[in-house]
Amino acid sequence: MPPHLHRAAVATALLLALTACKEDVKPVEEIRPVRYTVAGQDQSHGVRSFSGEVRARQESRLAFRVAGKVVEKRVNSGDSVQKGQVLAVLDASDYQLDSQAKQAQVAAAQANLAQQEADLKRYRELLTQNFISTAQVERQQTAVQSARASLQQAQAALSASRNQANYTQLLADTNGIVSDITLEPGQVVAAGQVVARLAAAGEREVLIQVPENAVAAFRNASAFQVQLWADRQNLPATLRELSADADPATRTYAARLQLQNTPADIRLGMTATVLANLPGTQKSGIRLPLSAVLDQQGKHYVWVIDPKTQKVGRKAVTVDAPDSQGISIQSGLQGGEKVVTAGVHLLRDGQRVSLLAQ
């Protein structure tokens, strides 16, 4: 075969091989993981959910009653303590010196009182012998009374000084758990500065924040259920306290619900959901998180997952006015459909997805 024909044959073979390889390469299909919810699942009319956390019935904000430098920290956050246990200690040198000075003043006042009483005794003997007048004795009696008052004043000052020295120890005022402590050795603290929080042992409650548009209905709720996120326990509860003043930052009202039965394994800070049966809140439609709704050109859509193909499809829906807890779907969605709740702006019609745990 002539050389030029051989080269042409080789080139043709390579071109065919490359074309075949190109046809065999298929693009990798992108599978996006998504979070989802089931439309209408665990939904009942008049029931509204609020997120909260487990707190102690009694919580103390602890502070030193005197200023000083921290020399010892004896507990950490999460430690269990007993009533009267020392949590932290300040440098007491100055307060001990002051107590010594006050002790010396008491000793001086005692000596002065003893001297004045001895003089009064002698004056009375001299009066019986008519060597001095009655007025001199009365003046000495006044001097004795003044010396006695000075002694009482010095003793009170000594007691106050000793109290100041004792206040250099931060004590637990009840049995409980140190939920927070914000001091370290070497730190200088002021009198009254909160340095620790103590959650008293005993009853546990759930603290939630109620939006202002639900306060009146929340106060008149017929029943409350607390669901712990850790183990999905449902616990009956009663409303113990609803703040009359809104938080200046969040504009919500703090509410505390008392658990009727406190599980032994419940811990402070656990995440909880409060389900409240609110009067006058019955609304038709399906409730979804705000993150599940896609707004495009004034219209509202949700991504529905096909259970057979695991692909998403966009569906137009009609929505009600949203609130802090979510949004109601008035039409376009059926109960039981799986709806994507996060990343709705990153999906496209027909895209395959993988479901993350709810």
Image (cartoon, rainbow, N blue to C red):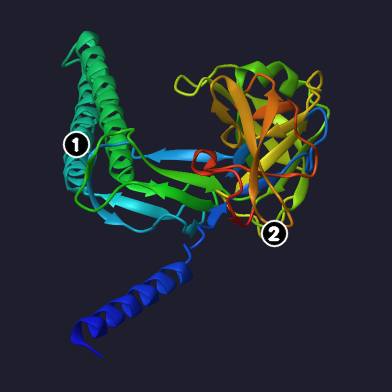
Q: Is residue 109 above or below residue 135?
A: below
At which x and y percent is residue 107? 20, 40
Q: Quadrant of residue 39?
A: top right
At which x and y percent is residue 127? 23, 18
| Amino acid type, residue under disc 1 in the picture | Ala
Question: Which residue carries the number 2 mark?
Answer: 264
Q: Which mark is residue 62?
A: none
At which x and y percent is residue 123? 21, 22
Q: Quadrant of residue 20?
A: bottom left
145 vs 42, nearest the viewer: 42
Q: Report the residue at 19% width, 13% height from top.
A: 136
- As helix, strand or loop, the secondary structure at mark 1 comes to helix
Q: Is residue 229 above or below residue 288?
A: below
Q: Which mark is residue 111?
A: 1
Image position of 21 (left or right of 305): left
At which x and y percent is residue 17? 38, 77
